Image (cartoon, rainbow, N blue to C red):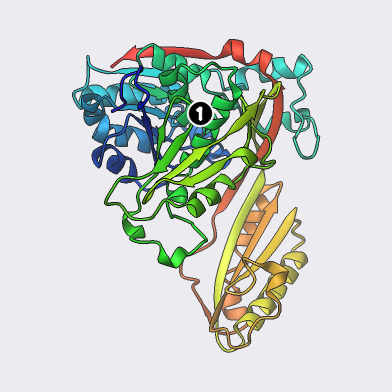
Amino acid sequence: MSVGAGSPERRVRVASGQGFWGDQLEAPVGQVERGPIDYLMLDYLAEVTMSILRKQHAKDPRAGYARDFVALMERIFPVCIERGIRVVSNAGGVNPLGCVDALVAAGRGVGVGGRARVGLVTGDDLMDRLDELLAAGHELRHMESGRPLADVRDAVQSANVYLGAAPIVEALRRGADVVLTGRAIDAALTYAPLVYEFDWPMDDYDLLAAGVVAGHINECGAQSTGGNCLIDWWKIPDLANVGFPIVEASPDGTFVVTKHEGTGGWVTRASVTEQLLYEIGDPAAYLGPDVAADFTSVELVDDGPDRVRVQGVRGGPPPEKLKVSVAYAAGWKSVGTLMYAWPDAAAKARVADEVLRERLDRLGLHFAEIHTELVGWSATHGPLAGEPDPDIPEVQLRVAVRADERGPVERFTREIAPLVLTGPPSVTGYATGRPRVDEIVAFWPALIDRSVVEPHVCVEVRDV
């Protein structure tokens, strides 16, 4: 546990337990049970995840959150309360209220009733206010194309703004043992506890930037401890038992990245550097709701086996606008696959693709896009793959189509299987049936003035 507030040796340990919805289910259990930590952060959300959750919520108003989170808390809630481990998570998705209701019921079911408090952060969901905001001149233009959201307003399914640390800090100050949010930035799940524990001022941008860097290292789980690691990946020990990262932070903003003893993977300057570079855009100004962090100022120092010290982080004022994640209906899609075997596997797949496209054209079917990959040759590197080796033992033909209407996509799914007997020879892998037709929920990134968001952010704390 963390040492007293007045001690120069004070450390706060924030452990990462999930890097995305679908990450290793046992990882957070191991973080809680294998050694001392003060906080467990659980990151479930990404842009595509919000779209999935919105589709679930549309079908069932009780859904729309990461249900894995509630099942996990049923396992670890009692030990977290006994050991004083506080949990911070964005598992609320597009239905944080429903998630809290389920969590409170689960907590009472496993015996922590009367001993635990749950904090709820809302205000990120803009859907009920969307028309009001558009009418007031907030155009929510696409950050890349510049198009106003009005162009697709009728298709919008969700709109959530990325919140920062302040409401999480408030929930912790009110005594929450678990803090649940909707769309908060990933890094805030780590640095909000540090702001709370060390009483960092929200205008000390160097400290906040250090917290953002800590959160960025934590947010993708084992990606900073050897998972998905490029450098010397074949040397990484015991990935089957890979440890997840733990940030040991100090009041001055320096921190050490480590993991529990006895776990696999590794923490090295290389593994931490790879995660630092992941999805950051401009390294000199990594923008968030609370600070612009300068990743070029980061210094990494070896601090012993599986320990890397991070120091020297600098930051500046945050932008005036907050980022908004909008999901909107963008048509229909389907993906069909067939496997072609040697000899001339790639040549057969190419001819099959040509035959399929000609048949679709003869049927008068119109698609916004048809995309073909030859898995085993060009799926990853595209044109850079060059000409295929004629001795490739097998190639998977993968064809994806997209259309504004469902009809053409539905018909496409009926034209894949006939290639087995009416196309090139040596087809395998066709026994799984017709491809599935899926609705496309697309991502629309936008910006909005923080002045119209932050007054609507609410923090509620409930007794379990």
Quadrant in which the N terminus appears: top left
Which structural element holds mark 1?
helix
- Classify 27 as above or below 215: below
Q: Amino acid at mark 1?
A: Ala
Q: Quadrant of residue 341?
A: bottom right
Q: Position of residue 372 (x, y in %)?
A: 67, 66
* Left or right of residue 244: residue 449: right
Compared to 255, does 127 lie above or below? above
Residue placed farthest to the left in the image?
111
Q: Quadrant of the C terminus?
A: top left
Q: Nearer the viewer, residue 454 or 289?
A: 289
Q: How many marks?
A: 1
Residue drawn at the location 54% of the way across and 28% of the way down? 183
Instruction: Indicate whether 230 appears above or below 388.
Output: above
| Residue at image coords 49%, 29% | 253
Q: Which residue is mark 1?
A: 188
Q: Residue at x 43, y 55 (%)?
A: 226
